[in-house]
Every structure is written in C-alpha cells, then in structure tokens.
Amino acid sequence: MIGQRAGVGNYTAHLLAALLEISSDYEYFLYSNRPLGKLEPALSKATQVKGYLPFSRWLWMQLVLPRLIVESQPDLCHFTNALAPLQQPTPFALTIHDASLFLYRQYHPRSRLLAIRLLLPVLARRADAIITVSEYARHDLIQSLQLPPEKVHVVYEAPAANFKPVTDQRGLAALRRKYNLPDKYILAVGALEPRKNLTRLVRALGKLHQRGSKATLVMAGPMGWMMEGFERQIEQLGLKNYVQYLGYVPAEELPGLYTLATLFAFPSLYEGFGLPPLEAMACGTPVLTSRYTAMAEVCADAAHLVNPRDEDELADALWQLLCDGAWRQELSERGLERARQFSWQRAAEQTRAVYRGVLQH
C-alpha cells in the first residue's frame, strides 16, 4: 500500500526509500494490487511489477501475487502489513505492527477480524522472520502467537524528514487561514476510531470548559469506524464550536499543524508504536499521551503521560499544559531531543540485517 497514505502506507514508503538509499547492492521490486502512479523520486529506483486486481486486495494477494513473485524471482519478500500469500514461493519477512487483533478485538471491524485473525497465526509460523515496531509489541506478539523469541525483531519507526519546526511565517499564516484555525488549539492526529479514545478526550475538554477554559480541539485524520454517535456527543457537551474536524490532511501540511498547535493530545488506548506523538515532538510541539502500551516506551520522559481511561486525570493534564508555559517549553525541548533518536536510515539498516539473516539461514 503506497498511494494516498496513512499508517502502513507511510511505513512502507519511508522504509523502502531508506532501503533504496543505503542498499545499492540490492534490487527492489514493488508489488501492488492497483497501479501506484508516479512515485516520488526517493522511490523511483524500485521496479513496479504489473499485475493488478484493484477490486479485491485479498484475491490479488492469494491468487495473483504468488504468480508474479515466481515470474520476477526475488530472493526474499517483505510483507509490510501482516498479510502474505498462503502459498508464498520464496523466503519472507512479515511486519506485524501490533497484537491488537488478539488482545483488543473490540477495536477492529468484524471483517478485519475474520480475514486477518484466522490467517495471521499461520503466516507468522511460516514467516522466516517477524519484524515489529516496539519491544511492547514484540512481547505481545510472542505471547499471543506463541512465537520463538529469536524470530521476532524490533525495528523502530521514525518521523519523516519533513517533520521539524516550521519557521515560514507566511506559510503558517496561510495554513491557519485555510483551516480557520484558532490562535491556540489542542491538536489530535489519526483515524477517528474507538481505540484512539477521542470520546474521552472530548469529555475531558468538556471538563476544561466547566472550569472556564475556552480551549479548542482540532482533529486531523480520516474517518474510521464505529464513531456514529461522536458528533452528537460533542453537541450534547456544548462543544460544537470548540471541536474542529479537518478530515484527511496532506502529509506536507502536518508539520505546520503541529507547529501551530499549543499542544498535541494522543490518549490512545493501544498502539504498537504510535508515530504521531513522535512527529509532534520532531516539530517541537509539547505532547500528552498514554502511559500504557508502546507510547511510554517511544516517548520516554519527553511527554506528559496519563492514564487514558481516567477522564479527570486527562482533563487535569490538559489544564496544566494549557496554563503552564514553562512546562510546555520543557516538553518541547525534551521532545526535539527524543525525536532525534529515531531515523529511517537506522530502521533500514536494521531491516536489511534481518534480510541478511533470512538469506544466510
């Protein structure tokens, strides 16, 4: 998945670009169930293999892809979204981003549960190597899928290179006009779906307004699933004029949104990695996130950590960050330093080491 990207599409694109940069001794083939169009220059060295089935990625992967792989004869395949052909003709590595399908079934649509939850244990056993994105996710996967620990490798993700503090004041002013952004706002980025915990975030915002705050929440990201009553809840709390939903925002505009934000809130209930807090840190934006799952591992002491299920604690943390400029500045500086510890070049080097291990086995 590359195209209009979020999540796994971004992971695949950034990893492939970094691999192409450091691996001139490898040739890379790119398989997709639909034409990808003109790719950015960083990906142009990869060879796109034609053989599409746009109406069904599942049928394409199981029926068309094995034939394409036999014809193009790669030494190894890397599947970046926890799915692979059941009849995979070459050695392969499988990236599984988290174990939420097994530990938090309620956060996934029924179709995803049926399709992936049944296949993933089989594919994980057949894979020559498993790549995941945090130690937390590695532990969950080993336990949930009964995998040998030596088979599961951690490769951290990283913010893209364009995530940095934006200093172009004219560009920032234009972005503020385009989205009608207030002078100060709390930013949330990610798909609107249950595990992102946005209903509690909105209720915490309501508690701030009861204390006299006029804080605005700005949400950027595609509409997910099971959020039918979300708008009604916002209206019932009297927050209709204080919650803005921007929808999908182009990747090139996100650094400006982060830079303009007073703080970034990401109280997710479960993440295998949680890239948006790291993107915010790379832009110098103070971050509030969950102290559970992978977020504490990724953010360390560079974010304000809360219990995401405790609305009072969430409201108190938002209030403190909005009122305490010195604490925001401290978190901004810690976040910039923390974000520098992650890079796609390092991720590519570690991924290539996994490839070599499979090929030498």
Image: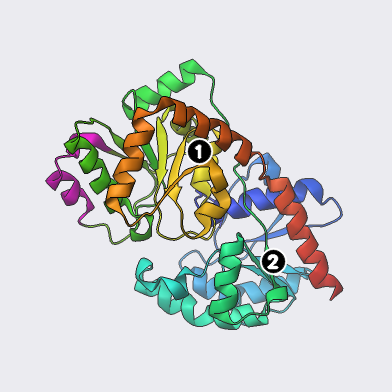
Q: Which residue is mark 1?
A: 280
Residue under pointer 2: 153
Which of disc 1 and disc 2 is earlier in sequence? 2
Q: Residues within 10 Å of mark 2 (few under 14, many from 20)?
A: some
Picture coordinates of residue 130, whole percent (x, y):
66, 70
The quadrant of the image that shows the C terminus is bottom right
* Residue 284 appears in the figure: no
Image quadrant occupied by the N terminus: bottom right
Amino acid type at circle 2 is His
Q: What residue do we see at 73% from left, 46% from top?
A: 345
**Residue 54 versus residue 316: which sits nearer the camera?**
316
**Amino acid residing under circle 1:** Ala
Secondary structure beneath dot 2 equals strand
Tell me residue 302's x, y (percent).
Answer: 54, 41
Q: In the rendered structure, which segment of residues is drawn in magenta?
A: 229-243
Point out residue 208 in the picture as x, y percentages from the top left corner. 24, 38
The label on residue 137 is none
Q: Vertical placement of 167 versus 266: above or below?
A: above
Regarding residue 119, the answer to whether it shows in the image is yes
Q: Position of residue 255 (x, y in %)?
A: 51, 33
Q: Residue furthest top?
A: 170
Image height of 21 relative to 64, above or below: above
Q: Residue at x 76, y 49 (%)?
A: 20
Q: Main secondary structure of the magenta part?
A: helix
